[in-house]
Amino acid sequence: MSITEPADAAERRAKPAVICYPVQALPQPDMALLGRARERLTKTDEVIVAPRDATTFQVPKGHFFRIVGIDGPQVGDLNLWNAADLSERFFSGKTRQLHATHVSTGDRLWSSLPFLRPMATITHDTLSWYGFDADGGGVHDVIGTRCDPYTNRLLSGGDYHNCCHSNLTRALAKAKGLPPAEVEHHVHDVLNVFMCTGFTRDTQQYFMKASPVRPGDFIEFFAEIDLLGALSACPGGDCSATHSSDTATCYPLKVEIFRTEPELLVGWTSPEPSAYPRTHGMTG
């Protein structure tokens, strides 16, 4: 049945937009302190993430890590967990609500409920110049989930095992010495590193376009807690045309871990989990 537009439709649409979460009281990172700390970094480890695959890495709290483009334009899907407790993991939806659809220097990656604390702070981003383009596209999104074999089967009828969800599952299974089915539920919505995305203006559909990343570009984070990370080099390459396929040109990514001088972090403390008592209004 057809719907008739009401007489006051224009008035209803003209209501002002209100920011859902006023964030003036949000704890802010000490970017000046972190800026001084990142001036004296010593690399302690690095891992290479092969194209169409994923690798795990660990970052002690108070250390920095970078995700680096090395051979060609390539996007990556990032998962983060509390290294001591996989139930505390990156919460992309809350990060999006507290910051924006796309994140950059000064934004933080927040953990899941009931913990809700900063897991990592973005301290440098060589693609911060990109902003938002004429299509509404931006870089490093917390909108998309991750390519996965379930959606692939739903839309194509076939199975593809190098989707980012599968890549991350295999990497976590290997790190924990467990079968994939026993760790898959820990794999979660990602930070789409280097990916350029937005929503179309006419149909509001999620779109991707060629990433502006080039070899040498990186995004850098400060680990606020002990982290276990997993990074997938997406089978879509730079996501200019397709994903979840063996046809796109793909490149490796590099993760670098750095320590700083302890005296440069005087005044910083690792954040505690939320102090909310978890009673949810019930007593007795």
Image: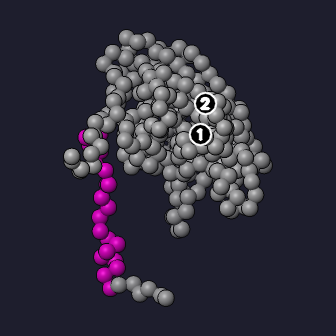
Q: Is residue 203 above or below residue 151?
A: below
From the top left corner, tell me how far across and down residue 52 is, in percent.
71, 40
Residue 158 is covered by the magenta coloring: no
Q: Is residue 201 visible?
A: yes
**Which residue in the structure is indicated by mark 2?**
176
Span shown in magenta: 7-26
Q: Is residue 33 above or below residue 231?
A: above
Q: Quadrant of residue 251?
A: top right
From the top left corner, tell me how far across and down residue 256 is, in percent.
58, 24
Left or right: 198 as drawn, with respect to 110? right
Residue plotted at (75% across, 43% down):
249
SS of the residue under disc 1:
helix
Q: Is residue 284 above or below residue 134?
A: above
SS of the residue under disc 2:
helix
Q: Residue type at mark 1: give it.
A: Val
Give the crowd class for mark 2: few <14, some 14-19, many >=20 residues within 10 Å. few
From the top left corner, tell me how far across and down residue 164 is, in percent.
64, 44
Check contact, mark 2 vs mark 1: CB within 8 A: yes
Residue plotted at (32% across, 71% down):
14
Left or right: 48 as drawn, with respect to 207? right
Left or right: 152 as drawn, with respect to 20? right
Q: Residue type at mark 2: give it.
A: Lys
Q: Nearer the viewer, residue 217 or 277?
A: 277
Q: Quadrant of residue 238?
A: top right
